[in-house]
């Protein structure tokens, strides 16, 4: 399972995603387009229940007819449409879909104030129903996207919009406290500071009109690793603690350092019974949110709100990090079978659920994983894969397991000798901050 080193890689990549260079170039060659010619309409308005207007770019087949809708709701700019891992919206529209790429509330072209996760349930419901009523729509809506854009799908699905038929959340979590903001109760310091700084807070800072807020974010972007040393966390200056409209959510995450009602309101793992549509869960062995994808699949199989939601879900795990999704990881080439399969997966998935095609998508084994080393895909009927043998690993050291050059080790031997232990701390976030401040990663015992 991914550890701190994987999270560090993901943090660097989150920063890379904010660059125009990566936004403008897909990781792989574009797949051949489908049979439908495509037109594009920019800034199509969708009014939410509170009067706030969100804008989307809509791609549609030029041929007269009735088509299902694919909806992506993202905070990363609708003009990018996450094409650093997916094919373009034009590609999906050429497969004879209407495709709507929408800026979420408070981001880029859309009105309102952005607060992470807070409005994605009601806005998601309203946006699905808006998409279903677009001219030329057949009334069936699917959603796709990864990371936070996976969250916008799950949070919409929890609200049970009548016209939502299927979702395809990739590389996203099952809970936004455990596995996103905190790991085992420890504040995910580098991730939770770099994510707003490098991707989601700048638009809000510009909208406040306070140039100092913009300047602080720009400053932090150029020296993000140095900002990790700053204490106390609740005064972290680069996200303007005195101006909640910039990133008030960040300081709320720090204040709520245990799982409570704040986190419960948008916890997916607590609401599987409210989700009534099947989900195609796509993830990677090196992704920071792999545990979330697995839990979402298993949880929906057990507690999903309909027979279709329970029996129709799939879990696909490839040899990928958070991004990009390609056959190579560092110096390792996993071969042509590891080429990004997402377009074929999603087109078959949505063709079946939104168009009613009898293409076998509902009969495929529900679990498909890439076996690294053998460099091939393996199908299974359940997770854990039948026949799995579990092995426990234990951490050891001679007292200096505090860096990549330390003497920490991992083994299957349970006898623990000279394990470095930090005494009980008043809160996990303080403990993590102290560890990060010291440049170390140690073990501590919670009270």
Image (cartoon, rainbow, N blue to C red):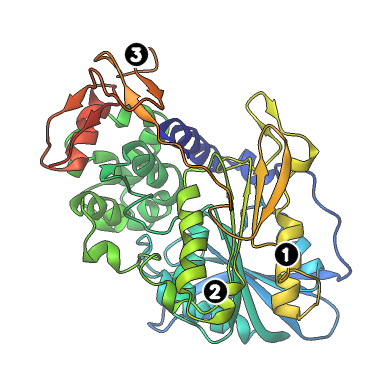
The residue located at (34%, 18%) in the rendering is 408
Give the number of the mark in front: 3 or 1.
Answer: 1
> Residue beneath label 2, please?
310
Residue 33 left/right relative to 373: right
Disc 3 to disc 2, C-alpha distance:
46 Å
Image spot of residue 444 (x, y percent): 21, 32
Image spot of residue 229 (x, y percent): 26, 28
For the residue carrying disc 3, how many other residues have a C-alpha within 10 Å: few (<14), some (14-19), or many (20+)? few
Sequence-wise, the earlier of marks 3 and 2 is 2
> Residue beneath label 3, please?
406
Q: Is residue 75 visible?
A: no
The picture quadrant where one finds residue 325 is top right
| In the foreground, 122 or 371 | 371
> Residue beneath label 1, please?
364
Against 10, residue 439 (above or below) is above
Image spot of residue 347 (x, y percent): 75, 65
Sequence-wise, the earlier of marks 1 and 2 is 2
Element type where label 2 sits in the image: helix
Sequence-wise, the earlier of marks 3 and 1 is 1
The residue located at (76%, 81%) in the rendering is 356
| In the foreground, 19 or 288 | 288
Against 413, residue 200 (above or below) is below
Q: Which mark is residue 71?
A: none
| In the foreground, 280 or 257 | 280
């Amino acid at each position: 399972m991914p550890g701190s080193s994987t999270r560090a890689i993901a943090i660097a990549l989150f920063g890379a995603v904010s660059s125009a260079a990566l936004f403008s170039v897909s990781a792989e060659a574009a797949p051949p387009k489908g049979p439908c010619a495509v037109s594009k309409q920019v800034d199509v308005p969708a009014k939410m229940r509170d009067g706030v207007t969100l804008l989307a770019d809509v791609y549609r087949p030029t041929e007269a007819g009735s088509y299902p809708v694919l909806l992506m709701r993202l905070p990363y700019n609708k003009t990018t449409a996450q094409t650093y891992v997916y094919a373009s919206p034009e590609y999906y529209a050429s497969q004879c879909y209407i495709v709507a790429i929408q800026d979420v509330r408070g981001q880029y072209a859309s009105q309102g104030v952005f607060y992470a996760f807070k409005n994605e349930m009601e806005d998601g419901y309203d946006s699905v129903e808006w998409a279903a009523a677009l001219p030329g729509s057949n009334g069936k809506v699917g959603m796709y996207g990864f990371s936070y854009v996976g969250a916008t799908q799950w949070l919409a699905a929890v609200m049970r919009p009548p016209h939502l038929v299927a979702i395809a959340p990739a590389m996203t979590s099952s809970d936004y406290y455990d596995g996103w903001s905190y790991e085992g109760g420890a504040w995910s310091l580098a991730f939770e500071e770099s994510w707003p700084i490098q991707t989601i807070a700048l638009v809000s800072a510009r909208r406040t009109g306070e140039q100092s807020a913009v300047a602080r974010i720009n400053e932090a972007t150029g020296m993000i690793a140095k900002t990790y040393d700053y204490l106390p966390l609740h005064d972290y200056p680069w996200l303007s603690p005195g101006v909640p409209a910039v990133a008030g959510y960040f300081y709320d995450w720090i204040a709520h350092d245990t799982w409570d009602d704040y986190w419960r309101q948008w916890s997916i793992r607590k609401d599987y019974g409210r989700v009534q549509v099947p989900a195609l869960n796509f993830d990677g062995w090196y992704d920071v949110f792999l545990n979330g994808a697995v839990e979402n699949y298993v949880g929906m199989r057990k507690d999903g709100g309909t027979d279709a939601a329970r029996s129709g879900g799939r879990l696909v795990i490839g040899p990928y990090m958070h991004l990009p999704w390609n056959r190579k990881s560092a110096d390792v080439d996993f071969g042509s079978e590891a080429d990004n399969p997402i377009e074929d997966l999603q087109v078959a998935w949505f063709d079946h659920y939104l168009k009613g095609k009898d293409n076998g998508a509902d009969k495929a084994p529900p679990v498909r994983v890439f076996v690294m080393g053998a460099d091939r895909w393996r199908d299974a009927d359940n997770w854990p894969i039948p026949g799995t043998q579990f092995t426990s690993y234990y951490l050891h050291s001679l007292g200096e397991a505090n860096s990549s050059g330390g003497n920490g080790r991992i083994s299957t031997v349970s006898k623990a000798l000279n394990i470095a232990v930090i005494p009980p701390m008043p809160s996990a976030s303080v403990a993590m901050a102290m560890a990060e401040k010291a440049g170390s990663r140690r073990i501590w015992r919670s009270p």
